[in-house]
Amino acid sequence: MHILHVVGARPNFMKVAPVMAALACKPGIRQTLIHTGQHYDPNMSDIFFRQLEIPEPDINLEIGSGSHAIQTAQIMMRFEEVVQEHKPDWVLVYGDVNSTIAAALVCAKLWIPVAHVEAGLRSGDRRMPEEINRLLTDQIASLLFTPSTDGDENLKKEGITSDKIRFVGNVMIDTLIRLLPYAERVDLPGVPDRYVLVTLHRPSNVDEPTMLKPIMETLIRLSERLPVVFPIHPRTRKRLAEYEIMIPTGQQLQLLDPVGYIEFLALQRRASIVITDSGGIQEETTYLGVPCLTLRENTERPVTVSMGTNVLVGRDMQRLEQEVHHILDGSAKPKQIPPLWDGKAGERIADIMFEYA
Ligand code: UD1
Ligand code: UDP
């Protein structure tokens, strides 16, 4: 059986690694890895292949950045040729980025079955580009691998039959469990002992100066109580320059370039609080038991709120400051790890795919 995997953006790499590794242990399965090139900076792509020991991509479509329509269409055009040439038996797509829906749509038209890893997550917010990608990918996939049981419920409500849905657990946590021992040993030069860790890249937070400015002002104020460490996504870096938002010198707010997975895991594990709008980081902090404040009105990962350490603070800067002080004063949520976030989700996926061989 020939399985073709499609990845393109940073959060895809943590998800494909354990699935490819588990499938490599199965006899008679050939794997091909396609990188769409949606993310291309060395610290948004190459570093993860090295640290996570993902095989070199067989093909890089080198799509790069563009509007949603341009990016999605170019991936489709180039990926269609790849599928026609390689004729895979199955295509595995990951998460909710433009590369995910573009590849799934190509396959649906060519009658190639698609398996979606991290299916069923819903924020209920169709203004998020990822929500559209999730809804559409799940409708056209033949197998849906869910990370949590809310995913199963969402899919059934959308008319997807139970025989296609498999609750396998969280592949991102497989990668975390595997690499945590390395993160525990890594040096973080220049990082203070106690700090707040921040990441932001959602268009709703960073593409509007009326949102990004108050966020940065709040982070500067918070840094007077505890230093703030902020590895900054290229989208956000661009917006800070465009809106001429400066960090006054002498502030305890460190802006870094994006860091590798092991370094970021170390930063999360040692942080007093994480402030983020990332999807994956809501999950990783839940597993690590680190308090997470999510700067969004909703989340497609509700289990991180109901069981984990995540608190949705919306877009309310006063609330963010209150929650930070509340946690620093000693009242954080207790830690509980969701079912099947156990480091074996990739193996479960490989076992199921092997049934189709
Ligand atoms: C994408 C995903 C988002 C995911 C995020 C993870 C979509 C619609 N969005 O958002 O779901 O949470 O990745 O990080 O698929 N850029 C660089 N170098 C790079 C990559 C991007 O400079 O290697 C800059 C470019 O200016 C680009 C911008 O970042 O225009 C946005 O990149 P894009 O991939 O379109 O969206 P993300 O915000 O990264
Ligand atoms: N991450 C990283 N370096 C960073 C920031 C994040 O390795 O500087 C990792 C993080 O640990 C998680 C993944 O990137 O595994 C999350 O990706 P991102 O926030 O870009 O996307 P999202 O999950 O929001 O789609």
Image (tube, helix red, strand yellow):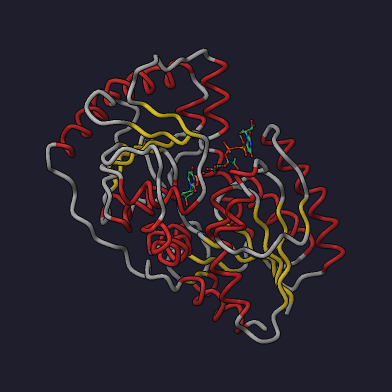
The percent coordinates of residue 289 (x first, y second) are 27, 54
The percent coordinates of residue 114 (x first, y second) are 66, 65
Count of residue discs: 0
The percent coordinates of residue 96 (x first, y second) are 56, 50
- Image quarter for residue 129? top right
The percent coordinates of residue 351 (x first, y second) are 54, 81
Query: Residue at horizontal 37%, vertical 23%?
Result: 215
Q: Is residue 309 above or below residue 125?
A: below
State the quadrant of the N terminus. bottom right
Question: Viewer-proximal residue, 335 or 49?
Answer: 49
Question: Viewer-proximal residue, 290 or 74?
Answer: 290
State the quadrant of the C terminus. bottom right
Query: Residue at horizontal 42%, vertical 70%?
Result: 343
Most extreme residue toward the left is: 330
Is residue 51 toward the left or the right of residue 31 in the image? left
Q: Is residue 187 visible?
A: yes
Is residue 128 toward the left or the right of residue 353 in the image? left
- Image quarter for residue 3? bottom right
Q: Is residue 138 visible?
A: no
Query: Residue at horizontal 49%, vertical 20%?
Result: 208
Question: Viewer-proximal residue, 318 or 104?
Answer: 318
